[in-house]
Amino acid sequence: MLLNSDHLVSMAVTRPRSGMSRRDFLVRGLGALAAPAFLGCGLLPSEAKVRPRLTARPGSPTATPLRGLTPLGLGLGRDGLLYVPESYSPDTPAPLFVALHGAGGSGASWASYPARAEARRMVLLAPDSRSGTWDLALGDWGPDVDLLDRALRHTFQNCRIDPARVALGGFSDGASYALSLGVSNGDLFSHLVAYSPGFYDPSEPMVGSPRIYVSHGTWDDVLPVTLSRDGIVPDLRRAGYDVTYREFEGYHEVPSEISDLALDWFLSAGLRQDRALGADSPAAVGPAPAEIAGAAQRVAGMMWELRKRNA
């Protein structure tokens, strides 16, 4: 996983096609050397079926959050990060963006997003998958469902979140996971954001009608743009979802302008439910450039302090 303030780029593990066993998928998708490690660690789905339903819900916080960037501290080995903006007030419900990394990444992969969250007065949750990628990409629902539930419960216990503005987003494998899990939890997630997804594999039950944003690079040589253009987006629209689709000239990445467009779409779409804003008004909630620059500088200092504490 590569990160800088403007782009997020990843390897990807693609979903097995029907007819390919999970063992064959791991050997082909992760490589003959990596696959035995996954198999030996018991990371293939067990026979006990895990349902893709989350139980955590926004409510009245029972704790006071630390402002800035902090580890989740869930005691799970791989952990994740929570960012609470300096402007957060328990008297005002805040929007929440849950960010799922790509294959081989972690919550720290979203290095530019704390500054974006600060500038938009938005809480950011960036958990780590239990293994190198999200369980559904390895064959079926598994421990990552419980991980997300715990991470969300931790967030709701610390922060007052606006239930009308809760987004589940991700990049690459994380985008595929966000779409697949999100449609089973549309009573929790008001919006889904998928940056360069590789698959969409919904499971019963499918609940609610979250609005969906999908972006994909036209030159993507990891997960071709046709996966979104000709498959995922038409399937979602046929299922009745409101989908905003953006193609950009680029590779397997999330350019800065795509991140800003997606976040402003999320926040303005939430506001439209309350204020009946026009369909083309995402810039109405976008931060000023100076505000973004100031937030980025503050977040850089926080991340430096966090790295020193964890060294």
Image: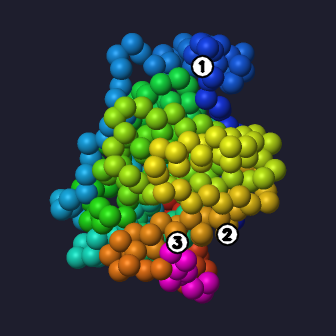
- Evaluate whether residue 307 shows in this view: no
Q: Give percent across and percent down for residue 194.
A: 57, 51
Q: Which residue is mark 1?
A: 18
What residue is pinned by disc 3?
A: 264
Three-letter amino acid code at the position of disc 2: Glu
Q: Position of residue 88 (x, y in %)?
A: 34, 74
Callout 1: helix, strand or loop?
Answer: loop
Rendered position, 285 above or below 33: below
Magenta segment: 279-290
CA separation in Å, label 2 and label 3: 11 Å
Residue kind at label 1, given as amino acid type: Ser
Q: Which residue is mark 2?
A: 257
Determine contact: label 2, label 3, CB under 8 Å.
no
Quadrant for residue 249, please give it: bottom right
Q: Position of residue 39 (x, y in %)?
A: 56, 14
How far across and down, in percent of the image, does residue 25 sit? 64, 19
**Circle 2 sits in a helix, a strand or a loop, which is it?**
helix
Badge nearest the viewer, 3 or 1: 1
Horizontal side, residue 246 vs residue 100: left or right: right
